Amino acid sequence: MHFHIYPEQYKADIPVELTVSEKAMSMSGESYNVTNAQGEIVFKMDGHAVSIRDRCVLQDHHGHAILVARKKLRSMHERWEVAKGEHFDDDKILFSVKKSSMVQMKTHLKVFLKGNENDECPDFEVKGNFFEREAQIFHKDQLIAEVKRKYSVGNVLMDKHTFSVVIHPNVDQSFVVTLVIITDRIQED
């Protein structure tokens, strides 16, 4: 499957394993570093706790904004919207994410690409048990990424969320990383 939200530079011909780590103490709100197998930063996401809405910006390793995500203020199913760039613009919305139901025992999020208005037919789904920090991301019935919690003494002591994310070939890594972080934020609320 070939899928990308952003330029093709954020996908690979082989499976890619990334580590998504929540920064233990961040003045800007919930922030994350995303590293590759060599420990190099691939993406960063900084949350903005001071803003009226939850808002976070995905940046590349140079600090250039790629995507901005924000939580809708009034939403029964806790909907998030994602747009291109650093500043949110309704004209640049790429996709939205929402809980499949208001009360969930297991994680089930629906992802809708821009233009898809059918709430019963999402383009992507996140399913699993995110309380245990395990989930799978599907495009229709095809698995595109898997998320598992990484345990270490430091992560447990500091209650820091760290995930291993395996992204299948030809899938946009910036899209998957954004979904993982939004899922973590939804589960925290």
Image (cartoon, helix red, strand yellow):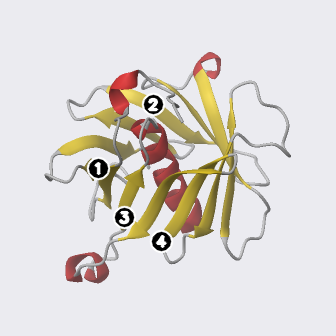
154 lies left or right of 65: left
Spatial CA distance of label 2 from label 4 is 23 Å
Camera-near label (2 vs 1) is 1
The image position of residue 101, as x and y in percent, is 79, 61
Is the residue 153 above or below the residue 115 in the image? below
Label 1 residue SS? strand
Spatial CA distance of label 2 from label 1 is 14 Å
Mark 2 crowd level (few <14, some 14–19, many ≥20, 10 Å Cα)? many
Q: Nearer the viewer, residue 142 or 37?
A: 142
Label 4 residue SS? loop
Spatial CA distance of label 4 from label 3 is 7 Å
Q: Nearer the viewer, residue 4 or 65?
A: 4
Q: Which residue in the structure is indicated by mark 4?
A: 133
> Residue at coordinates 41% horizontally, 41% vertically from top-left?
169
Instruction: Pick whichever of labels 2 and 1 is earlier in the sequence.
Output: 1
Mark 1 crowd level (few <14, some 14–19, many ≥20, 10 Å Cα)? many
Is the residue 26 above or below the residue 133 in the image? above
Instruction: Pick whichever of labels 2 and 4 is earlier in the sequence.
Output: 2
> Residue at coordinates 61% horizontally, 25% vertically from top-left?
93
**Screen quadrant of the C terminus:** bottom right
Q: Which residue in the structure is indicated by mark 3?
A: 163
Indicate the amino acid at tag 3: Phe
176 lies left or right of 60: right
Is the residue 14 above or below the residue 188 in the image? above
Spatial CA distance of label 3 from label 1 is 9 Å
Indicate the amino acid at tag 4: Arg
180 lies left or right of 121: left
Q: Which residue in the structure is indicated by mark 1?
A: 34
Instruction: Pick whichever of labels 3 and 2 is earlier in the sequence.
Output: 2
The image position of residue 73, as x and y in percent, is 69, 44
Do residues under tags 4 and 3 come within 8 Å of each other at their CB atoms?
yes
For residue 67, the mark is 2
